[in-house]
Structures are given as structure tokens and as C-alpha cells.
Amino acid sequence: MAKATGENNLLDTKERLYQFYNLVETSGLKEFHKAIETFHNCRKKLNSFAFVLHNAYVGRINNQTKVIKHNAF
């Protein structure tokens, strides 16, 4: 079985997260309700778990620019 990537992985992650929400709701454990609130607040960041994209390249360019600027002084 091939590992899911990209959008398929994101959909799987969201489905599992909603299953967790339902499990917490039915458990009656109030301690987990705070965890659910946190997950709801960070919902938009789920893409970082599904897509292997980052801004390291741009960060390196910015750092090199700052070093050149610093050395110029």
C-alpha cells in the first residue's frame, strides 16, 4: 500500500482528527475539551502535516543578504 501524500494525506488527517473529536465528546473527560479547543484554533496549520513545503530557501537568501549588508558596513 502506497503512502498517501498531499491532499489525500490532508483529508486522512482531517478525518482522523474529527474521529478524535467525536471520541473526546463521547468520553465525558473535560480535560480533553481544552485539547480540542487548541486543535480547532490550529486547524489551518494542518497543511503543514500534509505538504512538505517550507521557506528555508528564502530564509537562506535573506540571511546571505543580511551578511553581505553587514560586511559592507
Image (cartoon, rainbow, N blue to C red):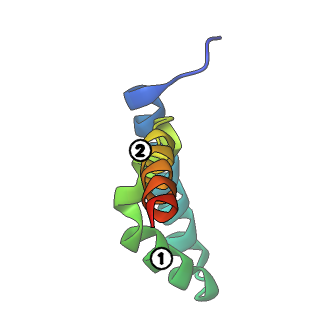
| Secondary structure at numbered mark 1 | helix
In which quadrant of the rendered image does the N terminus lie? top right
Residue located beneath label 2 in the image: 58
Q: Is residue 41 above or below residue 31?
A: above
Q: Is residue 32 left or right of residue 68?
A: right
Residue 33 in picture, x, y percent from top left: 52, 82
Instruction: Name the quadrant containing residue 37.
Output: bottom left
Q: Are marks 1 and 2 in contact (CB under 8 Å)?
A: no
Of circles 1 and 2, the one toward us is: 2
Q: Earlier in the sequence, mark 1 or mark 2?
A: 1
Residue 72 in picture, x, y percent from top left: 45, 59
Taking the spot 48% from the left edge, 38% from the top edge, the residue there is 50
Badge 1 amino acid:
Thr
Badge 2 amino acid:
Val
For the residue carrying disc 2, how many other residues have a C-alpha within 10 Å: few (<14), some (14-19), or many (20+)?
Answer: few
Q: Is residue 31 left or right of residue 56?
A: right
Residue 59 in picture, x, y percent from top left: 47, 50
The answer to which of 68 and 38 lies nearer the viewer is 68
| Secondary structure at numbered mark 2 | helix
Taking the spot 52% from the left edge, 60% from the top edge, the residue there is 71
Q: CA distance from mark 1 to mark 2?
A: 30 Å
Taking the spot 47% from the left edge, 53% from the top edge, the residue there is 68
Q: In the rendering, which numbered label is found on residue 38?
A: 1
Q: Residue furthest front?
A: 73
For the residue carrying disc 1, how many other residues have a C-alpha within 10 Å: few (<14), some (14-19), or many (20+)?
Answer: few
The answer to which of 52 and 30 lies nearer the viewer is 52
Taking the spot 61% from the left edge, 74% from the top edge, the residue there is 27
